[in-house]
Amino acid sequence: MTMIKIDHLTFTYPNGSEPVFEDVNIHFDNQWRLGIVGRNGKGKTTLLRLLAREYEYQGTIQGASHCEYYPFPISDPHQYTMDILITLCPTRESWEFSRELSALEVSDNVLWRSFDTLSKGEQSKVLLAALFLKEADCYLIDEPTNHLDARGRAVLCSYLQKKKGFLLVSHDRDLLDACVDHILALNRSSIQIIAGNFSTWKEHFDQQQNFEKKQNERLKKDMKRLTQASQRTAQWSDQIEANKIGAADKGFVGHRSAKMMKRSKSLEKRRQKAINEKAELLKDVQEPQELKIAPLNHRKKVLLQVDHVVMQYEGRQICQPLSFTLTQNDRILLSGQNGSGKSSLLKLIMGKEIEHTGLIQKPGDLRIAYVAQDTSHLQGSLQNYMKATGVEEPLFRTLLHKLDFPRHLSIPDLAKLSQGQKKKILIATSLSQKAHLYVWDEPLNDIDIYIRMQIEQLILAFSPPMLFVEHDQSFQKAIATQIVPVMKFPHR
């Protein structure tokens, strides 16, 4: 076992205005299963890339001379998967490839298929197999659950439980609960390592939040008390000055009032210093921002009726017949494998022309707030986006801020934002719309754990009617009132 020591790490992106890390110290064992959590943009992926020596930095990193980073870039995805694995792991034998793929429930036949013909989930598993076939001081794993359905995540969880010596960046709370033995939390003003899994850290986080909330309330009371005292002192000084007019012994009164005035100014100076110190402390308090939503009540109880719908592609049946009813009291989860037609069904409900059979019924005046899985349509300025979507600008910007979107961030082109930031824009758009029904397609992709918990609290507080697809099992358990399985059609 070797300690990996990061000392006095400072790093700023070449075009960045603020450092991502400034004089940071982190020490951990290279045999730990270390999960990394933190808000979007707080440096999780950056830390992995620094350990992989992809960026220049100030400070020292010891004990990690060779780290392997997942996902690997694939220069030619048209190659056979076997050729790609041989390129990535030239010292390994074919039976070792088969062993790792078998542990990830991937058939050997993918080795003789072009890599680009594999599903996104299969590609992810192949690259994970390659990662652990490499020799490294530490394995760096960045968001491995992207593109994996519920079964794929369960398989990944079982696979990682048998490994050690990795850093895992993930927003999947169940994965972090099952696979890690330490948590590295990148907070706004501090970095902490806690022994245990996600639940251990969550308990610590909740305690810290309660403490900070009480601290916040106490600081606000102190500031109010100091401000009121300052105002009383100023009023008292004015009264002393007024009493000097017409006094019998103006010299005595003037001398006494001057001394008292000097004393009051000194007291006022100390109080103002205390107020400023309290204000600085308030800046570091991480008080959760409460989100609000304004669902509309529809005159009809049934908002959506899906009757024997079968999604099709080029005349080929994708899923088995699907039927369900959604009322104003329902939050329905569509659950199924990748490629079973869940997203296509949501697009069909939104009015897009999708090949299908069966019937979908909804009121003609039903207003739907939609979060798409795909963010590639986001481009151009934020101002033009707000005009195109018709959102109420003050509310929309407030929601973005509460979703931890930086107010100072200049956004000349939405296409240049991170995937997490793009997803926050879509979520804020949906929340700012007054709707009868909220249709969300994998809304939590690339969204950090803090925001996930925040959105859960919002939905549980306001109980909007929802139809959604999401692979985060913690979110599923907390939000869904009904689960509708979407079954793939068994092609031979």
Image: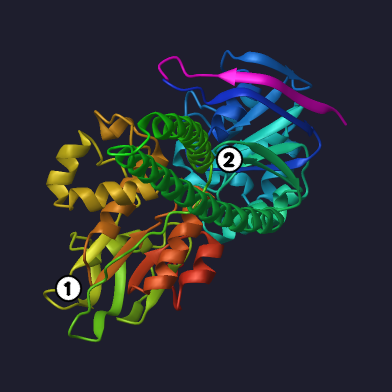
Residue 488, by quadrant, is: bottom left
Question: Can you see residue 374?
Answer: no
**Residue 200 image point, x, y percent:** 71, 56
Span shown in magenta? 1-16
* Residue visible at 75% across and 38% down in the picture: 95
* Residue visible at 46% across and 58% down in the picture: 454
Amino acid at the residue labelled 1: Leu
Give SS at disc 2: loop
Looking at the picture, tell me which residue is in the foreground, 199 or 172.
Answer: 199
- Name the residue tied to disc 2: 187
For residue 22, side relative to residue 399 (left or right):
right
**Residue 361 image point, x, y percent:** 20, 78
For residue 201, side relative to residue 317 (left or right):
right
Contact? badges 1 and 2 (CB < 8 Å) = no
Give SS at disc 1: loop
**Label 2 neighbourhood size at 10 Å, few (<14), some (14-19), many (20+)?**
some
* Residue visible at 33% across and 31% down in the picture: 409
**Residue 270 image point, x, y percent:** 52, 34
Q: Residue 308 magenta-drawn?
A: no
Residue 27, by quadrant, is: top right
Question: Can you see residue 287?
Answer: yes
For residue 210, side relative to residue 299 (left or right):
right
Marks counted in the figure total 2
**Residue 412 image point, x, y percent:** 24, 28
Distance between mark 1 and mark 2 Cα atoms: 41 Å
Residue 366 image label:
1
Residue 436, by quadrant, is: bottom left
Looking at the picture, tell me which residue is in the foreground, 94 or 58.
Answer: 58
